[in-house]
Image (cartoon, rainbow, N blue to C red):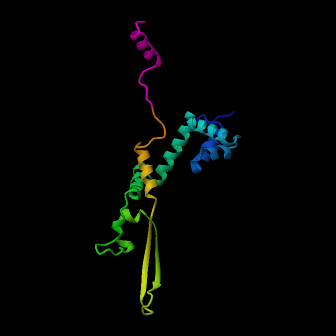
Amino acid sequence: MAKDASGLTDKQRRFADEYLIDLNATAAYKRAGYTGKGNAAESMASQLLRNIKVAKYIQEAMDRRSEKVEISSEQVLSEIGKLAFADIRKVFNENGQLLPIHMLPDEIAASVSSIEVVTSRIPGGEPADIEHTAKIKFWDKRGSLELLGRHLKLFTDKLDVVVTDSLAERLARARKRNGG
């Protein structure tokens, strides 16, 4: 198997390039021409992501992409924070009336998914009597809080264990405790 300057085979590079499209390892595995179905494909794709050379290639490509579009992790976290901590009260003035869109604070404008204004006649009123009803939808607050929580490692699906000494050192201490 021929390898390129980064030490990747053609198929590994293809997998990495496909992974960069949608960050879906199993789909990238299949699109790169690897064979395997279901859990086997998922497992093999996961192994490829853990390959040091593949991981390095992907990380370097993602770093280049971030530099090119000038997006930093701080900006992403800031935007997620706007969505997570949006306060509906900030879309109204002190009289309880909806603020015009151009007067919304930046952090609130960034957190609004959509605004729908429904115009209808007031029942029993004059033909010129019109009522406006605004429906405001925010982006997913719970999902944004979950993203921030995962980033801050507030919730984990796995336990990370850090071992600071080797197995040999631990065995030696155990023998010493047992008088051996």
Image quadrant where residue 35 sits: top right
Is the residue 40 above or below the residue 94 in the image?
above
Q: Is residue 168 magenta?
A: yes
- Would you say residue 145 is visible in this rendering? yes
Image quadrant where residue 153 sits: top left
Question: What residue is drawn where x is 51% and y is 49%?
Answer: 65
Q: Is residue 84 magenta?
A: no
User: Which quadrant would the N terminus be assigned to in this image?
Assistant: top right
Residue 50 position in % (x across, y down)? 56, 35
Front residue (pair 36, 8): 36
Q: Which residues are magenta?
A: 161-180
- Would you say residue 72 is visible in this rendering? no
Question: What residue is drawn where x is 43% and y is 78%?
Answer: 133
Front residue (pair 102, 169): 169
Question: What residue is drawn where x is 47% and y is 84%?
Answer: 120
Front residue (pair 20, 139): 139
Furthest residue in direction front, as rendered = 124
User: Which quadrant would the C terminus be assigned to in this image?
Assistant: top left
Residue 39 position in % (x across, y down)? 65, 40
**Count of labels shown?**
0
Q: Is residue 21 left or right of residue 93?
A: right
